[in-house]
Image: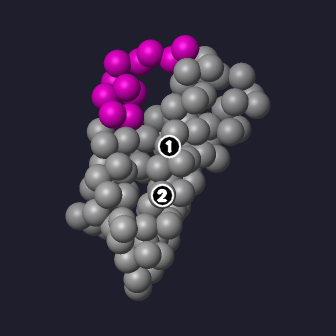
Amino acid sequence: MRSKFYTYEYAIQFARECRKLNVPPDLQDQLNRASASIALNLKEGSARHTEKDRHRFYRTALGSFRECEAVFDIMDLRSEALQKLADTLGGSLYRLCQSTDSK
């Protein structure tokens, strides 16, 4: 089933790519959980009825994304393809959070 929720689609692709990386087991486990958390929080948040609830889940997804970036920094991972996907996902997450921020 394909959706028009592009941020979620990017998150699924990102999680799959993260699982392919060759990093130490402790960081791989953390990376797997954090990258899956992005998609899980996006999907759960999209089902929430209030903008405030959606925003909370989307911010959690952004936090998990930042956690993945920290693993990339620790391991000095510089894959061009992964970086492009990360940039796309990160920008999309940021815009999604901005659009649901009730200020």
The amino acid sitting under disc 1 is: Phe
The amino acid sitting under disc 2 is: Arg
2 displayed left or right of 15: left
Secondary structure, mark 1, is helix
24 displayed left or right of 79: right
Q: Which mark is residue 59?
A: 2
Residue that lies at the very extreme toward the right in this rendered image = 26
Circle nearer the N terminus (1, 2) = 2
77 displayed left or right of 9: right
Please tell me how crowded label 1 is: few (under 14), some (14-19), or many (20+) other residues with Cα within 10 Å: many
Magenta-colored segment: predominant secondary structure: helix
* Residue underneath mark 1: 65
The residue closer to the viewer here, 27 or 64, is 64
Please tell me how crowded label 2 is: few (under 14), some (14-19), or many (20+) other residues with Cα within 10 Å: many
Residues at marks 1 and 2 touching, judged by CB atoms closer than 8 Å: no
Q: What span is colored magenta in the figure? A: 76-87
Instruction: Identify the residue shown where x is 50% and y is 67%.
Output: 56
How far across and how far down the image is residue 96, in percent?
32, 58
Q: Establish if 82 lies above or below 90.
A: above
How far across and how far down the image is residue 18, in percent?
52, 35
